[in-house]
Image (cartoon, helix red, strand yellow):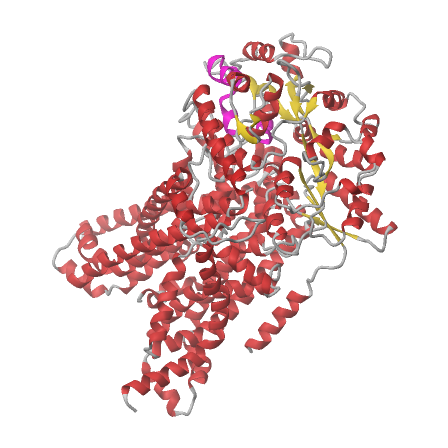
Amino acid sequence: MQINNVQGMVLKGIKQIIMLILLIYLVFPFIWLVSISFKSTAEILTGGIHVIPKDFYFDHYRSILNDSNLIQSVFNSLVVSIFSMTITVMIALPAAYSLVRFKTNIKNAVLGWILASQIFPAILVIIPLYMVLRYLHLTDSIFGLTMVYVVWELPFVLWMLYGYIKNIPLELEEAAFIDGATKLQYVYRILFPVIMPAIGATAIFAFIISWNEFLFALVLMKNPENVTLPVQLSRFTGMEGQARIGLLAAASCLATIPSLILFTFIRKGFKSGLMTGSVKV
Amino acid sequence: MIYLIFDSLIDFSRSRETSDKIRFVSLAWQEQLIEANREMVAQWNKANPDSEVEYIQSSWSSIYDYLITSFETDGVPDIFHYESTIIVDFANRGYLTDLAPFIEEEMKNDIVDVAWASVTQPSGEINGIPFLMESWVGLYNKDIFERNNIEPPTIEKPWTWEKVMEIGVQLNHDTDQDGRIDQWGIGMGLRNSANLIMNHSISFGGSFFTKENGKYVVRVGDEEKALLNSIMKMYQELKCMAPESIGKSGTEIIPGFMRGRYSMVIGIGAAMRQQLVENAPEGFNWGVMPPLVSKTQKTGINTQTYSIPKKSKKQKDAFDFIRFAFNTENMAKLARSDWMLPARKSCFELPPFNTANDGWEIVTKSVDHLTVGPWLGTPGYSEWKGRVANPILQELYAGRFSVDEAAERIEIESNLVLSRYQRNK
Amino acid sequence: MNQHSLKKSQEFSQLKILLPILIPIILFSLLPLGRGIYLGFTDYTLGSSIKFNGIENYFQLFKDHYFWKSFRVGIVWTIAVSLGQLILGMGLALLLHSRIKFFSIYSVLIIIPWAMPPIIRGIVWRQIYDPDSGILNSVLMQMNIIVNPINWLSSFEHVIPAVIVAGIWGGVPQTTIFLLAGLKNISTGVYDAAKMDGAGIWTEFTRITVPLLKPTLAAVLSLNFLWNFNSFGLVWVLTQGGPGGLTRLPMLAAYEEAFRYGYVGYAAAIGNVMIIILSVVLYFYLRIQFKEQVKT
């Protein structure tokens, strides 16, 4: 009917407008960051509001490439994030499976731990954790930091995988057992490919948590050569930050890119409602 | 498969074990200074292949956490660069090597007495070797002064606080005729002003910290309130200070100065001249003003230092490097790149400290007015600054209470903080 | 096999699977946690020895106006930011759910705040709020909304809203994602039936969407509440807790106590108190949620 069409169009228009407003709030700061990274320090300090720089200035990016500490920290972050993501998911998969299939007291304990671990303030843990690592000679070590991240990401990853696996029909499992597979074989050979997209989503979550993490890396990694990217960038937030804001902006842009790229890969998941499983606790 | 992952990770991690060199942590961030440091280290390493130095760069915002965690373990650096007021706390906690036994006559005599005073405990222990002295000066906009026929102060004829206020009022202008002042007489970096206030109150006779019955207390009397009253006068009564001053640090106030928003900046560290030299727009003419006079012209000193942690296993070698780094030529290089005063008297005769360029003459002469604040060696000074002084000062500037009320609050809260330290001793 | 031994054998196999991860968990999570809680009952100060001192820390905490101030700041911050995130996240989720055009582009764009490490969010917003070179003041002055530049992060009047806006920003993406997932769970059949009964948009929302979304909402709100209360990096970069302690969140206060001033035992006591308070709040909130669920 004609009235419905007009109503529909107006509605669509309003939706787009609201969307745009919200988007400006969310996206503009990033655009501004990119803009600054291409402006000279002098131009930044004059406080102009042009998004497109008067003269494109590439020196900030050039300086980053020359700053060996920064490059090193990017590398460190990548290593830690990728390894912790992989290890966490590989460990969590069979664990989550067992949580779904076995209804034991342990399961309740684990679920309780998952919830509780979100409450504990990191500050409480940081010094004793530091002492434990020192005892194991694992402070200031990429391996140590990775293991810490694994342990601290596990609750969330477990929770997500738990939700996904719960939705897998029992028949799949039974079919595998009839063919003579052990539980472990089932998990890795059959379950894994089946929920691959979900694993992807979970893995990316794990990566982002590691990539963004600050406090543990700050305290546990002392040698400036071993620090991760967020910590390295926080170095510039003091007095030096004022004088080198362009450089800081450029480095910050680069720090955002990996997560963005990864995220476009699981974007497809949204449309198919992939996340539904995780939210059903 | 999991084991493969673990293996490679452990391998990667292992390959980063630290070497057996002397670990030297520096806070240099200006490119020139980093270059100077690197050259120095390279020179040393060439001449001393048996005790090579590893140059590690940290930053002012992260060094504190780094040191604190490393002191608690064995991962200490052998030499670290920091500041006189903070290493006092480290020394009190037993983290530092007493450097007094290592120092020779030559160094003792050449380094300015007041610099030594900034790092010496009442017991005679020396926490670190000072090499840079921070001196407080003022900046002025030459063009604005000329346009208004104002003679800038000189070393022989410095200004008083009253004179600065007078000129400040005179120089408030509304250049674009829109009814609002856009060119202010004075700008100041008052965001975390405890350091500034403490060091400048000395010229008013204010010391804040005294010893009563063997214990440190804070008393805020008329002399201590004098500077605060002057600042509030400039800000609230005479309105010759730009309002954004209360929210900016020294570094942050400089861009406004470069844009001509303030004719003068007072209570600024000499090191800020670097920003002017590197970032000022074409044709910007600036000059340096000597420290302001009140009862005296004395200001408190902070020095930058190199120290050796007690847990270092290479104390002697580390000190050899320090001796090299702080010889006249090298110290001059470091100070020059940082735009601060070197601590050695022999450096004053080298350029640029002996020239009039960029206000160096005024800065160099200001060493005559430097003195040590009575709070040196007080346990808890750093905490006091962060927990009591800065927050209360911020509230004062925001107009939340009067100077007298601020004084009361400072006294009460200070003594709470200090008593905690003295209880634990 | 009877039920009991079935359970036992299940437990055993489960344990076998879980063992490799239990060890690091105990080492890096439970052990430090226990130790941390214990430290809250000592007078551990950096540079000296550890001495058990019972609940003395808590007496001091009770009298410490510094601590209570940061607790107040924490509550205000947490509620404001969580609510903001909920409202904006809900709006976005609804929009995205309703088959809006350009969905693929939008879904990538809204992720941006989350893709930034919190430290970097702090850097970005600090630059936006910069009184001289920040875009906010420049735009506001151009539009003649304000006369003098406002020092957002140092001004007693403006810092709290400024910090809250930045805080909300970081949490909207993940809130949106969770809510969107929850929305997709609701079968369209329910909506169709409602439409046939002549329900308008608002009724749909309040009578159908919200109630069916309750479990998701509970999860999202709880998580956000916890995460926001424990927030550190963002505010640290923006204000270091100033001016005058107005933005000193509990985490920042604990960090200062432990790392700046060396009172580790005291900081641990703060941590213990926070755990208790958070647990209590969470418990009551979830209880209310489940009671309602049972009712519906």
Q: Which residues are magenta?
A: B230-255
Q: Look at the picture and state if A143 lies above or below B344.
A: below
Image quarter of residue B92: top right
Specify whether C275 is left or right of A219: left
Location of residue B185 by image quarter: top right
Locate residue B319, reporting x and y percent: 79, 45
Comparing A174 with C205, the one in front is A174
Residue B327 in sight here? yes
Q: Is residue B352 left or right of residue C203?
A: right
Position of residue A191 relative to residue B323, above or below, is below
Which residue is painted at 77% across and 48% down in the image? Answer: B318
* Residue at the image point whose x is 76% and y is 40% from the top: B100
In the image, B38: left or right of A4? right
Residue most extreme to the front: B213
Q: Is residue A210 above or below residue B361?
A: below
> Going by the image, does A59 lie left or right of B237?
right
